Structures are given as C-alpha cells and as structure tokens.
Image (cartoon, grey):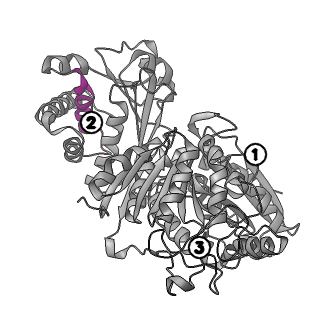
Amino acid sequence: MGKTVLTGKHFWYGNIAIAEGAIAAGCRFFGGYPITPASEIAEHISKRFPEIGGIFVQFEDELASMAAILGASWAGAKSMTATSGPGLSLMMENLGLGVMMEVPTVVVNIQRGGPSTGLPTLTAQGDVMQAKWGSHGPYEIIALSPDSPQEAFDLTIRCFNLAEKYRVPVILLASETVGHSAGKVIVPPENEIELIDRKKPTVPPEEYLPYKPDEDLIPPMAYAGEGYAICTTGLTHNEKGYPDVSAETQEKLVRRLNDKIRKHMEEIVDVEEENMEDAKIAVVSYGQVSRPVKRAVKMAREDGIKVGSIKLITIWPFAENVIRKWAKQVELFIVPELNYGQIYLEVKREVAGNSETVLVPRMGGKLITPQEIYREIKKVSKK
Amino acid sequence: MKPETRKEVMFAGFGGQGIVTAGYITGEAAVVYDDKVATLTQVYGPEARGSACYSGVVISHEEISYPYPLNPQIMVVMNQEAYEKFLPKLQQGGVLIVDSTIVKPDKLAEKYQLYKVPATEIAEKMGARVIANVIILGFLGRIWDAISVEALQEAVKTRVPKKYLELNLKAFQTGVKLGEKALKKKIIKR
C-alpha cells in the first residue's frame, strides 16, 4: 500500500494539492468526467488510488458522476468529483438530490470563464451564485474558496470534514488560477490532520430512523449494508425516509435542511482579516483575488490610507455577521471579483446602506493585479 | 514601499517541447531544494500540443501576491512563433536565451542581452531531441542568481524517467558549461 499522507514540502499544482488533500482526508471514491481546467485532479487520483485502495471511475458524463458519488457515500466511502462550470451545470440535478438525501460528499469546481463553454483554459469567479442555488428548491449549502495550492490542500480537507459533519454536499470553489498554478505546499504529519467522520447511529437497528435528527439537527447516518434499514428519496420524506408529500412534512424537513447550516454559521464561516482595526476602507475578496488584494492593501497602508482586507474563506454560507460588524466602522467596501458582481451584492445587502459599496469587476480570463487594486483603493480614498 | 523580491523567468515555445516541464523543474528546484517560495503558471491554447505556449516562474523569499509573471527578467524561447508572440513580454534589457537551432532572432532581440544556445542541435548529437530543455535549464541555472545549479540538478533528477537519468544529467552539465562560457564572455546584469 502506498502512503496516504505525503508529509513534507512540495511544489504542487493546485489540482494536485486538491487530489492529495482529498486522499489525506480519507476520500476513497472518485467519480468524474474530464474537463479543462479540472482534469488533472482526476488524472492524479487515477494514479494514486490503485496504490492506496481507492476506487476511481470515469463515468459517461457528469450526471452519472454526481449520482455515483452520492451512492458511494451511502455505501460508506468519502467521495468526491471534480469539474468546471459546464460540468457543474450538468451535476446540479443530482447535487440537489444530495442536499435532500443529506449525503456527505465533495464537489470541486475549478472555475473557468463562462457563461457556457466560455474560456476553457482561463480563469474566472463566475460560479459563485451557481454554487449557492444552482439546483432548484430552497436550500443551504457550504462552499469554500482557496487562494493558492496550499489552501487548496487545506480547504479540501476542511470540505470533507464539513460534509461529514453537516451531511451536505460541500463545494470547493477554486479557479483555473489556483488549479493550474503550482506553488509551495506543506503537508503536515498525518497525526496533525484533524479528520471528522459522519455521525453513526447509537440506537439498535430496530429503533433507527434514518431522518430523525439529533439536537444539532443532523441525523446519524448508517451505511447501506450495515444492518440498518435505510430508505432515502428526493421526495419530501418523513423521519423514516418514506415519501410524505405534505405541506407539514415539507415545512419541517426543508426548514431543518436550511437550519442545520444556518444555526451553525459561527462554526462554518471562516474569514481572514488584516489591518482592519482602524480601517475606514475594507477590501472584501475571496479565492485567487485575495492574494493581490493583500499586497495592494500593504501598498496603500504605506501611503497612510486606512484600509484593511477581509478575505472570505467560506463563501457559503455568507459571512453576514462579519460584514455587518465592520459596516459600523468601515465607510467604504471595495469588492474586486472576476465576475460582474456576485459577492458584491451580498456585501451590499449586509452593509444595508450604512456604508458605500464599490464593485471592481473583471469578466474573467485574467487575474486582477495588485497595482490595479491599489489604484482602486487610491481612487476611492480621495472621495 | 519595498518592492517584492520577485525574480521571474518565462519559457516560451511549442506545446510538446517540455516548456511547462522546464518551468516545473525550475519552480520545484526553488521551493523544495533552495527553500524559497515560487509559483508556476502556464498559458496555452485549447489545442494543448502543437501551439505556441509559455510557462512562467516567479521566485521570491516572501509570499507571492501574483502568481503570473509581471515583468520577467529572463525569457527562454524555443520556437519561432513563440518568439514573435511572446518576446514583447520580456522586460527592457532583460536576458533573452534562444534555442538557436530553431529560433532566428531578428532586430527586436537587440533590445535585450541575447544568448544563443544551440540546444536542439546539441541534444540531437547526444541522441535525443527532447533533452534540449534540460540543456537550457543547465545554462539558465549557471547564469541566473535566483536559483542554484545544485537545486536545479536535484529537481531534474526527480522529474526525468530513471532510464534517461544519465543522459539528462549529461545534458544538464553541458548547459551549465555553456553558461559558464557565456558568463566569461560578458558580464550579465542580474
């Protein structure tokens, strides 16, 4: 058997870091369909899984891939797929099924320029809203966004932990810049990597109800084949897992599916704040854009501008408390993103007219430079 | 404020020439064997092989804010189309290394410190055209202070198939010697 955790210092592409992060997190089933710029994840896993006893399947399409990782998860495996925007669009139906059936699994989106097939080999951040509500129905989901190969490794592990804990598909919202750039990745010793596994039933099989939640709103999950009766469906269902298409059951179930995320916001939401203590201007960014932002903020600080940075590591659920808190002090929020305003609208909503919100949009294709962000900070600081 | 200590090199050529591999070896050498920070990025068309492409490596002592090359000090060019397409990205007065078997520099090259390395010709004589990029890496390691020859050689060792290790190391050393000669001939502004 090969090593599962490659402790040490590496020079890895983000896509390799994601694959290794998944392996370190205990992922042993990958179902996918190749797409630029995400294919290297599948390629690497297809080489590594035979060494460590994982199952890799290249399916006929994205629909089958998404369905398979749900099934694998029910069979007890930590499972994953990796795709890009066009592929994720095709996975949306079964992603919703995963939400409804409460299946822990991880979906990686290496964002490229869209809409449609757009820019296959170039970067973007256009799928932020798709990650939230790309499937139909009222639901909450978790999405994290890495800014580098190191974070790609670390956050992939966190995606698995969150998926296992909250029984929900978790999206790693990376981008071509992160997937296709290589950088320094430190892999810690195996015993320093904290892993969370799904909650198992504590009651005997005859008392088990697959959708009876504990106080934390999350039901314990038995694997198929362990002796527990499991019934699951995409239809609105009762605690037995039987279809029960009534307004009352819908109210109870769907409210819980949302609340199990919303009521654990504090635990799920992760942000990195820098130079915020006395900031009058805050740059809110996520993923790849956070790196040039950090530099731009340092440059502007040297000019005496009171500017800080809020980097969103968790994209969904949105860090609303963080923005609301800073809106009391900050006069102006700048939101640079590689789309035409998606997180910008969330920031603006939370700022609620207490401060000004400025969007710095790029349609994708190219990462915004530190100089460009610095110029925006200078411009608004003169207001 | 103090500028970032970015050292940047771009490898430009044709898909299939080992352009991205050369960048990868350089970045890995910097990070794993020289204990620095580095990023590697690449630009290619959807066709992947058989079109002009480049890879860029940024090496620094600190966190790199922008992973793409912004103002490369060195450019290695291994294909004529890539020469025409990407040369303007090289900083004024920068170091231009061409595989002179394939690339014929024109008047535009006068703006730069030009080095002609007949890498493909030497590689063919050594029996394998594909090691041209390793010859260039040896040359680069010798003339560029951002990276050590030792680190590059270690990275070459880990990246080439065992069967061809000796040939690759020979190619690398050939490049180092050519770099040595070039250094003696003229002082390179680094």
Q: Position of residue A274 (x, y in %)?
A: 60, 69
What subunit carries mark 1?
A: A
Of the two numbered discs 2 and 3 in the rendering, the one whose residue sits closer to the viewer: 3
Amino acid type, residue under disc 3 in the picture: Tyr
The span from disc 1 to disc 3 (Cα, nearest Å) is 31 Å
Q: Position of residue B97 (x, y in %)?
A: 33, 26
Q: Quadrant of residue A300?
A: bottom right
On the same chain: label 2 and label 3? no
Judging depth in this view, the residue of A289 and B147 nearest the camera is A289
The residue at 33%/45% (across/down) is B146
What subunit carries mark 2?
A: B
Q: Is residue A213 above or below residue A299?
A: below
- Does the residue at mark 1 contact the one at mark 3 (Cβ under 8 Å)? no
Q: Is B28 a magenta residue?
A: no
- Quarter placement of the C terminus of chain B: top left
Q: Where is mark 3, residue-wise? A: A166
Amino acid type, residue under disc 1 in the picture: Tyr
Q: Is residue B108 above or below residue A131?
A: above
Q: Is residue A217 above or below residue B64?
A: below
For label 2, the SS is: helix
Of the two numbered discs 2 and 1 in the rendering, the one whose residue sits closer to the viewer: 1
Q: Is residue B122 shown left or right of residue A144? A: left
Of the two numbered discs 1 and 3 in the rendering, the one whose residue sits closer to the viewer: 3
Instruction: Assess disc 2: are there few (<14), some (14-19) or many (≥20) residues with their C-alpha within 10 Å of its C-alpha.
Output: many
- Quarter placement of the N terminus of chain B: bottom right
Please tell me the numbered disc located at residue A340.
Answer: 1
Q: Is residue A106 shown left or right of residue B110? A: right
The span from disc 2 to disc 1 (Cα, nearest Å) is 45 Å
Q: Quadrant of residue B166?
A: top left
